Amino acid sequence: MKDRPKITKVEVRQFSYQINDLASHPQVRIPVWEPGAVLSGEAHLLRIFTDVGITGEFLGGRAAEYSAFPMIMPSLLGRNALERDAIYQDVKHVLQQTVPTAISPLDVALWDLAGKFYDSPLYELLGGAHRTSIPVYASTFLADRQPGGLDSPEAFAEFAQQCLELGYRGYKTHPWEGAAIEEWVATNHAIAKQVGGKMDLMVDAHCALRTFGEALKLGWSCDENNFFWWEDPYMHAESAFPYRKLRQLVKTPLLQMEHVRGLEAHVDFIVAEGTDFVRGDIMNDGGITGVMKIAHACEGFGLDIEIHHAGPAERHMISSIRNTNYYEMCLVHPKAPWLGPQVYRCDYKDGLDAVDKNGCVPVPQGPGLGVEYDWDYINKHTTSVVAYE
């Protein structure tokens, strides 16, 4: 039997990157395409070192999560790195009144470490593959007002056609912040006229609509055009009650809980009949351990979970979950570059052109997450390193 790996050091490395032709939106966290602009960002790469020479890694997480790491390190250092669920429970308890999402990057890195320890791709540790080629839907950037961008209902329809020709199985829009509901409805109609019946259609209102009435109008337009789901309809995001009412008045399936955190809250929302599809998010719902708990709970209710965002961990989870449908290629645009640092040294890739002719992406086959990072780039752009040992 192998010696169990004990955690000897945890390192959080922050590095900078820039993306041309993107700009921050003044009201929401989703960026927009803006030719000539430069979006500056900071990314984090977490590494967990052990006494057997195996290191778990994860690219992701926000400054808020890492700010809570000093609180959890005293109980983490020296611990068996394979005790993922026990660590999840302990950290969740310690951080429940501060930054509970801080467990998320830590958990993913521990799963990566475990895969390397057992020399297996992560999906095998999660139960094995239901699929190793994953269907993808195109999830657009936030609508913009730039000529040639996603600036009109017709532009969204044209981009839907482009995505269909690339092989995508589904297409989801993020309409304009602050636009009239009539423009949102017109966008649904234009897209359905262009590609309806040829790919699954979705709309994500990203909680931007302000009234129940506006949400109803959007939902009814989804009904008219046979949408697969509609998502986060309006600002009242945390309570199940109004969404139960919307489900009574709109027939299109509702996808909720991007703004509801954790297993227990998800189950409460399901029991209250506030959704049809269930959203799971690695960074917001407790890492891989937390989202897999939600996926199994959904299975018990006979519901599907849809995983938020794109990344290696998301691919492994979708591969190993029966009750799920799509990988979200988030975010894509006819002219904007991929959102996020391109720091993979292997053949892993996300972006508009990352799907194959069948509209699918592969699951990495290497140990753990199955990806390698470009350490030359990361080291060159490192802005800070915090180590706990």
Image (spheres, helix red, strand yellow):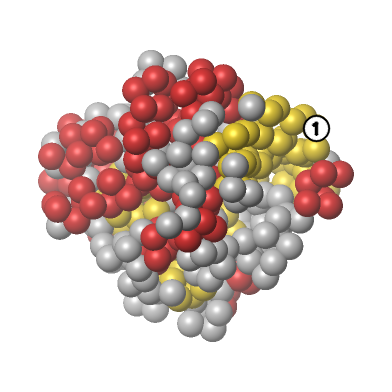
Is the N terminus in the top left, top right, bottom left or bottom right quadrant?
bottom left
Q: Nearer the viewer, residue 168 or 282?
A: 282
Left or right of 153? Residue 239 is left
Residue 214, percent from left and from top: 33, 39
What amino acid type should be assigned to the residue bearing mark 1?
A: Thr
Look at the image and tell me whether residue 285 can be seen. no
Find residue 116 and report its image quarter. Answer: bottom right
Look at the image and tell me whether residue 387 can be seen. yes
Identity of the residue drawn at 54% across and 83% down? 357
Find residue 149 and report its image quarter. Answer: bottom right
Identity of the residue drawn at 53% across and 24% down? 73
Describe the element under mark 1 as helix, strand or loop.
Answer: strand
Identity of the residue drawn at 71% across and 36% down? 13
Q: Which residue is mark 1?
A: 383
Residue 338, percent from left and from top: 67, 57
Is the C terminus in the top left, top right, bottom left or bottom right quadrant?
top right
Crowd class of label 1 (few under 14; some 14 to 19; many from 20; radius 10 Å):
few
